Structures are given as C-alpha cells and as structure tokens.
Image (tube, rainbow, N blue to C red):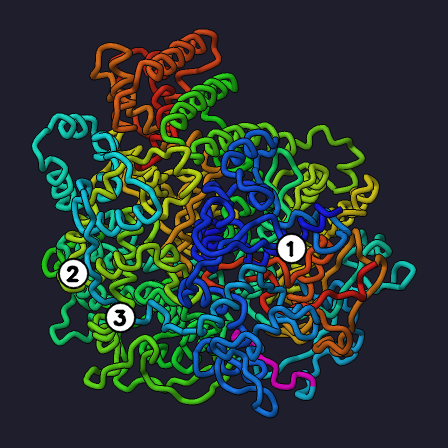
Amino acid sequence: MGEKKILADNALNMNRRAFLGKSALGIGGAALGTLLGCNFYQKEGELLTKTDNPMGIKGILHSPHHAAKIKRVIYLFQSGGPSQFELFDYKPLLNQRRGEDLPESIRNGQRLTGMTSGQDSFPLVGSLYDFKQYGKNGTWISDLLPYTAKMADDICVINSMFTEAINHDPAVTFFQTGSQQPGRPSIGSWLSYGLGSENQNLPAFTVLLSRGSGRPNGQPLYTRLWGNGFLHSLHQGVQFRAAKDPVLYLNDPQGISKSTKRAILDNLAELNEKQYQEFGDEEIQSRIAQYEMAYRMQTSVPEVMNTEKEPDYIYKMYGADAKIPGTYAANCLLARRLAEQDVRFIQLYHMGWDQHANLPSAIEKQAKDVDQASAALVADLKQRGLLDDTLVIWGGEFGRTNYSQGILTDTNYGRDHHPRCFSMWLAGGGIKPGIVYGKTDDFGYNIVENPVHVHDFQATLLHLLGIDHERLTYKYQGRRFRLTDVEGHVVKDILA
Amino acid sequence: MVLQTKLNVLVRQFLIGSFSALILIGCGQKKGGYIAQDEGESVVAIPDSVDFSLHIKPILSDRCFACHGPDKNAIEGGLSLHKAEDAYAAIGENKDRYAIVPGDLNKSELVNRILSEDPNLVMPPLESNLTLSTSEKELLKKWIEQGAVYKKHWAFVPPESPSIPNIDNDSWSQNEIDKFVLQKLGDQGFTPSEQASKEQLIRRAFFSIVGLPPSAEQVTDFVNNTTPNAYEQVIDSLLGTSDYAEYMAADWMDVARYADTHGYQDDFERIMWPWRDWVIHAFNKNMPYDEFVTYQLAGDMLPNASKESILATGFNRNHKITAEGGVIPEEYRIEYVEDRTNTFGTAFLGLTLECSRCHDHKYDPVSQEEHFQLFSFFNNVDEDGLMANAQVIPKPYINISKEEANGVLDFVNMTNTTKDVKVMVMQDMSKPRDAFVLNRGAYDQLGDQVHADTPEAIMPFPEDLPKNRLGLAKWLFHDDNPLTARVSVNRIWQRMFGKGLVESSYDFGNQGALPSHPKLLDYLAIKYRTEGWDMKKMIKYMAMSATFQQSSAISDEMREKDPENTYLARATRLRLGAEMIRDQALKLSGLLNPEIGGPSVKPYQPDGIWEETTGGGGGSTARYIQSEGKDLYRKSLYTFWKRTVPPPSMMTFDAASRDLCTVKRQETNTPLQALVLLNDPQLIEAARAMASKALVEDSLQGQIGYIFQNATSRRPDTAEMDVLQKFYEDALAKIESGEIIPEEYLAIGEYEPEISVSQETLTALSLTAQTIFNLDETITRG
C-alpha cells in the first residue's frame, strides 16, 4: 500500500493510474505531466527511458516552498547517545560537586531508565577531560576533540537538544522518522520523495555503517531506520557496504563478463518489448528501464566507492583509518565523494556511544574514531566549495546523565541515558557558523535557554532544503503524515 | 511566469491531495451535468444529482473533519459537519447563523466561507494547508441547493441482498459476479475482454490459488483437455493441495505480523512457528473463516477449548516485544495491547483504530473512549512489558511436546526438534485488569475508567454476549455486523483480482476508498456469511467467474479510459509476490523441498548483513548461520524472519516488514529488483538446475522450449526462439573466448547436478535459463 495506493484514496474514488501510472516512477514529473495535459499515460514510458535517471526518482515538489539554502545533507549519526559532558557541554560545577547526590530540586521527578532507577544514590560526576575555548566566540570544546576544536568557527554547536524517548530503539527511531514506534519513513526517504534525486546514477538516499571502538558490542541498528515506511520503496535508503557487494546483489555472478551481462540485458529487453507489444502493460516498459538503471548502478557504485585515486593529502586529512574500508573515517571520505555526486541524503551511523560503564576510557577511543574524520569532512567540503550547499550534522539520539551510573571512582564512572538535554553540531549552508546555541543549567540537567526539540531539528533541516515541514505530507490510511508529525518549529536563530 | 504560477498552484494541489476531482474527469469521463472550469487546465463534470456518499463526504472528511468532525475535543466554532443535525444546527454567539440551511445557499454560511477571499474567513483556513478546488466548491453548493441530504457511511450500514442485474443478451456471464460487472461495464459503454488463452488461464489459476507455476505437462494436459469442466477440475484439484494452504498461510503471516524474532533492539529469536503450522493446518482442512478467526481471538475461552484452539491464540502474541534494558515495562505492555487492538481493527474491521488512541478519531465515529473499550478486551493478559530474560519465551505460553506433535497437534512439524517447545498464547487473568482512557495515548496518563465494549456506530455489543474476547469474536461474526464479511471477502477479491472492490482494503472508513462495485461487494459478503464462511468455496466461485477468466491484454482505448482497471473489462496483469518469485524458481528447477512446517530456515542471504547491524546481543540472531542441504530450498514461507533485518531479497519485492499488521502490500518496480533477479545466487543456482533438467530434451530448441514453457506456461514463438538460440550460441562463443568461465559460473550455490553434458553446454544453457527467469512474463501471474 504505497504511493500508488494512497494517491487513489482520493475524494471521488477515481482511478489513480490515469495520472500516475502504475509504476509510480517519476511520480512528480509524471503527475505534473498529467496535470498539464491529459495525454500523460503514453508519456510515462518515454519519461522513464528518455530521462536519463536510473533511480527514476523525481521529487513530488516541482519547485521548493521557499528558496533552498542547501542541496544535500550528510548526517553523521552517533548511535548510542554520546555524553555531552565529555564533549561539548562544559560543566565545571559537576567537578566541584563531584560525588554529591543530584539534588532532588534539579531532578524534579524526571523519569529514569530501569538501569539506574534502582540506584540508591545519584552521585554527580564531571568530565575527566578538560575543556578549552576555541574560535572567535570562545566555544567550549573538550580535549577529546582537538580536530573539531580547530574548526570551531565553522560549526554551530547546539547544547539544548532534547527528545521524548529515553531508550535507544524508540529514540533513534524518533530522530530518523519522527515517531518512536516503527513504521514511518525516515528523513532520507522523505527527502527522496519530496525532492527526488539530482544524480543520474545513484540512489538519492545512501547509508554507511561503522562500528565504534568505544563499545564494540553495544547498540544494534535496524534496517527500518533507513526504511521507506509507507512511501514507495524507491525512496528507501540504500546501504553502501564495505563488502564484496557494495550494494546488495550488485555484483554480476562470478564467471561472467560485462559483455555477457550486456547480452542478457539486450535479449531481455528485446523479449520484454515483444510482450509489451502484445499486452500493452506499461509496467513492462518500466521494467526494461529498471534493468538499465541497475546496469548503470553497477558502474556508478563501485566508481564512487573506489577511493584509491584519492591523493595522499586527503588521506592525511581524514586519518589513517580512512584507508580501512568500513571505518568511520573511510565512510566520511565516501560521504564527501557521494556529496560530490549530488546524492541527496548521506546517512552515516557510527555505533558504540552507549557508555553506561567505563565511560572515560570508552569515550576516549570513541572520540578518536570520529574527531579527525568529521573535521576533515567539513574542511574537505569547504575546500571544494561544497560546504555552501551541504548541511553536515553530527549527533546522537539522546544525551547522558550528569550522575554516575554504577560506582563512581577517581578514574571511572558511567552515565545513563538522558533525554532532557544533549549536544549536537551543524555545519554548512544556511547555518550560522561559529556559534553556540542553547544553554543548560549548571548541573547540565535541564535546559534553561532555547530548547530544540527533535521535531524542531527536523523542521529546520527541511527548511534549509526549501521545504515547509508542514507541507511535505503523504496521505496514508486516510491521514496526512509528515516527518514532524504535528509539531516542530524552524530554529530561525541558527540560520545564517 | 503565468505557467510558473500555474505550476505552483498545481503542485500545491497535488501535495494537499485536492487534485482528485481535478484532472481525472477532465481526462475523458465527462458525463452529464454542466462543466466547471478549474484553476488548472482541467474541466470537471458536475453531476446532475449530487450524492452525499459519492461526492460530498469524501470532501468533507478530507478537508473539514479535522476541525469539524467526530473528534469532539477538536471542534472549532461549535460546528461539526459529520452529522446532519449538527451541521444544520444554529451556531455563532447568538445562535443566529447556520452552516448549512438545506436548499438555501444564501443562508448557508458554509457557502460564504468556502467562497470567501478574505484570508481570515476562508475555509479551510490557510494554516491548514488544505484547499478546495473550484469543482469541489461547486459540488458542495449544488449539494446544499439540492437539500444537503446526509447518508450514513455505507460501510456501517449492514449489507442487504441486492437484486441480481438482469442483462439482455448476456452470453458472457458464468455466475452472478459477472452480471454485476457486466452491468457496470455497460453503464460505461465498455465490453469485457475475450477469455484468456488456456495457457494464461491455468497459469493465473495456479498462482492465484497455490502461488506456484503449473508444470509444462500440466499446461499441456489442460490445453488438450476439451471436456467442458476442464477448468473447474483444475480449480478443484488446486484447492485440494497443501500448496493452497501454504499460500493462504503466507498471506496470513502479513496480517498476523508473524516473525521469528521479538522485533526490538537486539531482536532475539522467538518460537512461534508451531502457531504458523496451525495456520497451514487450518487452511488445509478449510476451517470456516468465522471459526478460524474465533480460534485466534478466543481459542482459549471456547467451551471446548483444546490445545489446538489455545495454540491458535498465538495470533495475538505475534506483536513485537522488547528486551531493551531500562525501558519502563508498563509503557511497552500498553504498546502490545495497542498492537492487538489495532490489528483487530485493520485485519477484521478495516478500520484505522490507531487514529483514536490519542484523541477521538478525526474521520470515523470511533471515540477515544471506545478505542479504550476495545483495548480492554486485550488488556487482561498476565504478561511482562519487558522480558526479564530475552532467551526465555515470555509468559503466558504453552508447552508442546513431541508426543503431542505426534498426536493431538499432529500438524506441528517437530521432526527436527529435539526438545519440547514453548509457544506464546493468550490467557486472561482471573480478574480483568482495570482499563482507562489514556490521555494522549500515554501509558501513565490515566483518564476515565472504561470497560470492554465495542464502537456504537459499528454495532452495539449485544447484551447476551460475554464481555470478553469470545464475546468479541461473536460480535465480529454477528449477522448485524456491517464490516466483517465485507472486509474479509474484499481481501479474497484482492488476492484473486489484484486489488479489492474497496481498494483501501485496510480502511473502510470515511477516508477509505469507496467500493467500485458496492452491490457486488454486498452480494459476496452475504453469500460468504450465509454459506458458512467457506474460503475454498468463495475462491472457487471467484475463479469460475468470466470476469476472472478474461485476457489481461490492454487495448489502447481501455488503457486510456480505465487504466486502473476499476471496471474489470480485463484481468489485471500482476507481478508475482516476493515469496512466489523465489518459490517459482525453486519449483521450476526441481530444487523445491516440499516439507511442510517446522522451524524456520535460513537460505542464501548476502554475507554480513546481520553482523553489521548487531550490537553483539541477540543470541542466535547476532550471526546468520546459513542452513544446509535441503533446507536451502524450502518455500519462502519458511524463511527465518528477523524483524530488524528482514530478508533483503524479499523486502526488495515488497514483502511486509512484519512490524505491524499489513493487509495490502506495495507493488513496486525498482532497479534493486533487477539486481536481485540477475544476481541472487538462489536464482542463479535454480537456473542451472533448470538447465540440467532441460537436458531431457535432445535438441537445443527442445531444451530452450522446455525451459521457456515451464517458466512462462507457454511455448516460445519462432522469433523468441531465435533470440534465445542466438543468445545461447553467443554464450558458447564467449566461453570459447574466455569471457565466460564455466567452472566459476557453475560453482554458484551448493547444488551439484549430475552433468551428462560438457560444462560449456550446461553454462550456456544455464545462462539462457537465467535470462528466461528474468523475463517480465516469468515474474507475472498472467
């Protein structure tokens, strides 16, 4: 029950095919083609084969709701919930009052997870790592992030993010789809649906995974996080993997040459065309086109994944890991290459931030995984002039508690999940660089200034892309859904 | 510039969904009445007589009900438009104005507001991002002019036996279905298509009833069988197979959101396959639908409850269950009860009950209170919101021993199971849990207490029934229930014809599609119910109709006039479903392992996809350990379903994720599908096995013909044979030149056929088979 279906759910129960065509490809364009004249049905096949767009995705928005600041997004998702206290939200008070119990006046009945709700006490704990101020605005950044610190003037740090979910599965799902329970499309799918693909040979929404060294066995991921939900499956995120098959089923079977594959496709096309002549089903035409698209992906994907020709200075920027496929650094480099190819939404996931115990040692490793490469990505985009129309996002699904989970010692502690405040940063087109937005109290427990809800973040992201988050909707099961559900405000203060 | 503006307008209309009336009629369906010019290019016909259900309610529901509809807490300006008495009532501070005065446009404020150009007054308001097209405004005006007559929503009025259309010179109809269809076709000036070729017909019958292709012999036998009831014989024999039961079960897995894992976070394995085996068993013995559903809803409460009927209640435990450390158990327990409630709505009532969890339903007459009254039927299980130990099957469960699997539960396949298995089932606590309206749907925001009951507007709960799940099942199958029979027979129709008579088979409410053939739907619903909810009989009845047996060829004219095939002047060409695509390849190749039931298996899957997303937890689901030998070739119904990383090749072909109850799948056509068909080792291996089977034929033409006929159910014509023969010869040349390396290509997959020919020959023929497997026709029902 997809696009196809829903579009048929219209007032007069008229048939949808008259203006969309069964394949649901090139939907926006096709639909407009129809809107402008009645002869669309004949046009669809042409539309597919004549437009040179293998993924076949045209956005439903023919023109943006307002002028877009950016064309694409790279989302460096830090999965597990990075601790804001060791990275961006500097709270010397927690060091001064180390070991003291969290005052009830601060906690104020806030919900705890089942992990710490049984604890007798909630000993406050400050960062073991020092902070310094960087950049023109004196942004506080921890010693764990020396490379990020150096680009303080390029990024906008938000210390006042908050979410509604306190457990991983619902919290990650909430960030990626706007709903805690599974079933809705993810951000990238919404963008693919709304804006389509600008690339001729690659999917509009790509996904790259890496595993952190902070907690190698920690939070899992779920493929539904890059799922299309109720949108057409053309909008699903396509995982680019550091594996033999960079995209599932991409490689030809062993033992056959490219020319053999070509021969198979040519023969298929000829035989399928004959069927089309007999049965007149447009779906057959569309299938012929899809085989051609698949064929082109077989070239375009390996091309973009092959970083061998990157010069040494680039590898130096991203760090030694960049040469190891499947690492965060290698994925950052790939993200830049995908951005160069105008892939609309590039989603990275770096696992391992869920540091309930042994946080100091785990976060040191974890920060090392991401610091240099994240900064390199921003710098690399900048030097290519791509940062102007790309948004880079760095952040996780929630923050961590200001008190220790488990026993607090001189050198060790853990932190539980904390949804009420956490940090993330943004960089790129349309974002004010070099600022810190939002403020938490001295305990780092509650937000005291400029709270940013997950839906606000999502609304802002869409805004930068020229989309009014209240107007990018999809009717499913009788209701118009949006990424931001029924909430969300654009955070105008951080817009350039 | 003008064009640009027009585009913007059109884009906006496209977005907000008000485009429906706009274009469609403009494209060739001008009928009667006068013609209104819209903002766009399109010309819309306004009917002579405006019908509330057909023309008005869809507009009111979609554009007005959010603020003027059934949700009493969201009503703006004291006006609601979903009921006549409210819509006609006096409004405003002085109660001196009226939204609708039947027959009087001037006094009807609604008319002023929808036509207003004042941004502060116009309806729908600007901030709603909703608009009315000119034609919709015209329709509303004309409706008020004609008396603003309201009608109860069609789906909430119990079906009444329609009279069978009497059509002159009808030599086409085979049964009543056809008479209803023919009448509608006649109204449109359409005529039915000729009967499908016998090859196409038997292929369609096979895929529609057993989900597998006919063999070449079966096709030939049928083509040569000239007895008048040859087709009926085929239908009867198919309905008697266990393939039928398995195929029906595959459909039911989507409805029941069946999976082999718990579905959240680390996604641990669970054992629900004995329940799945029961489903197959029930279809096999043609259990009537009312009994089938009653077993699943309340098998534990039946007076003669048996181990079998209790096992059937596993249906309501198939939802996801969390083991994520730190969650609040009650929050998740509520989710499970919600899941059961919403599944009940989607699967049996065709209603979106989830929309009434946080507030009264915005479109349908289901209040939030009624939502939680239904909820309370499912709220009495002694279950844990959070699994204490993810490796232990959550309570309540039953234990199934090997003895039972050889006795009273002999349909449970425990051949490869050494220990007893535990399966989750429903069991109510002796005292029902108190249930409350949950404000905003949140687990800890208790509102008024509620007691088990059903929505008044659908059908009040009879006083003589117990207020428990058994009573609920009886309510569902009560003669006065307006929805159950329609919803279920519509899904059988969807399965046989590709889409339901109500296309939104998941939503029979105000926002759902209207039935394309309302009388036929009612006729079938009543027939189904009065003839004992006999599923096989209903499937046969549909299969025997002339409507089902039409050719699927589309003429240019009909493509223009009825591209969606709403009027059924032909059969719809349908792509095979995810399971069928793989199962067909296994069947054709002879690799298919016909074993029924038992623990799910793990066929070929790309390396590493479970491993790269796991956090190390999950126990048996952290790593994918591929099955061996015959288990690689079980039907796709038995493929292990890990909910957080479902089988990618099946997902690519639109399988449901099994997160939630699904009654209708997407039908898409994507480049990733091409990649699976071309490169999935399962299919390449099957092509090789197919090729080695084809060697029973001596000549190359014989071999290619054999493969082609088995795959498409017809012989290739000369032109096709030429193409494929050239391809074969070209492949041989490429082997010669080293572009194809037989040892490598033939090594894909575990299956090692005994080869009586050279590797070169087998490779060339396998590639030919692979090409045939990729034909659009091969993955199409016909």
Q: Secondary structure at mark 1?
A: strand
* Circles 1 and 3 on the same subunit: no
In the picture, measured across the screen, residue A426 lies left or right of residue B527, that is right
* Label 1 vs label 3, nearer the camera: 3
Q: Nearer the viewer, residue B741 or A323?
A: B741
Amino acid type shown at disc 1: Phe
Q: Quadrant of the C terminus of chain A?
A: bottom right
Can you identify the residue that label 2 sits on? B288
Q: Nearer the viewer, residue B391 or B112?
A: B112
Can you identify the residue that label 1 sits on? A77
- Examine the residues drawn in magenta and state their main secondary structure: loop
Q: Identify the image quadrant of residue A172.
A: bottom right
Q: Position of residue B288 (x, y in %)?
A: 16, 61
Q: Nearer the viewer, residue B736 or B208?
A: B208
Numbered mark located on residue B158 in the image: 3
Q: Nearer the viewer, residue B49 or A334?
A: B49
Spatial separation of the CA atoms under disc 3 and disc 2 = 21 Å
Q: Position of residue B682 (x, y in %)?
A: 36, 33
